[in-house]
Image (cartoon, rainbow, N blue to C red):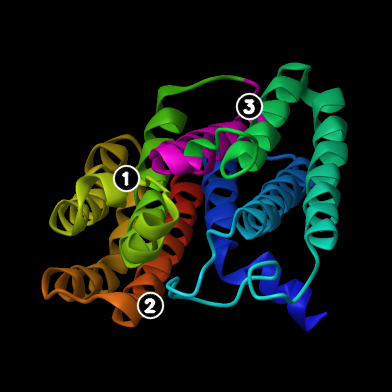
Amino acid sequence: MKRWLLGARPRTLPAAIVPVAVGTALAVGSGVIWWRALAALVVSMALQVGTNFANDYSDGIRGTDGETRVGPPRLVGDGLATPAEVKRAAMLSFGLAAVVGLVLSLAVGPELLVVGAASIAAGWFYTGGTRPYGYSGLGEVFVFVFFGLVATIGSAYIHTEALRSIDLLAGVVVGFPVTALLIINNLRDIPGDTESGKRTVAVRLGDPATRNLYVAAIIIGFALLIPLTLQRSGAVLGFVALPFAFKAIKLVRDGAAGRDLIAVLGLTGKVELFHGLALALGLALTA
């Protein structure tokens, strides 16, 4: 079980939990249907885990998880599981997301089927298929769209069954910190990705510009709390994560590299988690 827990990458789950929490909080004033909120959480987490296993499988069979990669072990790349086993784990996770998503679609509407199918496809083709978009510098776009906009707006929509401007703004606010996680991860992996031919945004921009991009993503995520606070005052609670943001930005600005960026990843994870959960709490309290 330990190896499968490792492959599921539980430290990435806040990226799946936060948008559901924020989306649910946005719907508090309109009436939350709690079983739908729980179902949305299961779908989001299953998609995250499925994407992690799919990434492990695809990178492993391509040989891109080489010796120069810095970070935790990978199931296929480090020989902890066979490619077939990891692919099966990905399919089971995506299957769980599909089944629970189908139940939600029966209660809300068929439009959720389209969103769900697109989410599963995006998770698989991030590093899978003949032309994975994650290898072409579009990974950050995927994370922003699906773990920012789609997950947040969708988590509100299943209760309100309406598309609202405040949901869109909150999705953007959630999207920037979670995208910053991928940016700093890719900054850390520039040497290995360059060697394996993986053309991430970090590889394309280079080290200095990627550091600036990371700082910009963090700052924008907090700056957009201001217009959101003007619509619902409790959003101001999102600023509680600022201390973690300041520490992370300082390390990046001071030139942290390689394994030193693991600490930045941890701090960025705390930014994303506390920024999002405090935001959700504030939104719910002032609904």
The boundaries of the magenta stretch are: 134-161
Labelled pair 2, 1 in contact (Cβ < 8 Å): no
**Residue 30 among those drawn in magenta:** no
Q: Secondary structure at mark 3?
A: helix
For badge 2, the amino acid type reads: Ile
Q: Which residue is mark 2?
A: 262
Q: Which residue is mark 3?
A: 160
Determine which quarter of the picture holds residue 128: top right
Relative horizontal placement of residue 82, taking residue 268 as reference (left or right): right
Labelled pair 3, 1 in contact (Cβ < 8 Å): no
Q: Which residue is mark 1?
A: 201
The residue shown at (40%, 64%) is: 192
Rate crowding at label 1 as few (under 14), some (14 to 19) or many (20 or more) other CA atoms within 10 Å: many
Q: Secondary structure at mark 1?
A: helix
For badge 1, the amino acid type reads: Val
* Dominant secondary structure, magenta: helix
Q: Quadrant of the N terminus?
A: bottom right
Relative horizontal placement of residue 266, taking residue 35 as reference (left or right): left
Q: Is residue 3 above or below residue 123?
A: below
Q: Secondary structure at mark 2?
A: helix
**Residue 147 among those drawn in magenta:** yes
Rate crowding at label 2 as few (under 14), some (14 to 19) or many (20 or more) other CA atoms within 10 Å: some
For badge 3, the amino acid type reads: Thr
Q: Viewer-nearest of labels 3 and 1? A: 1
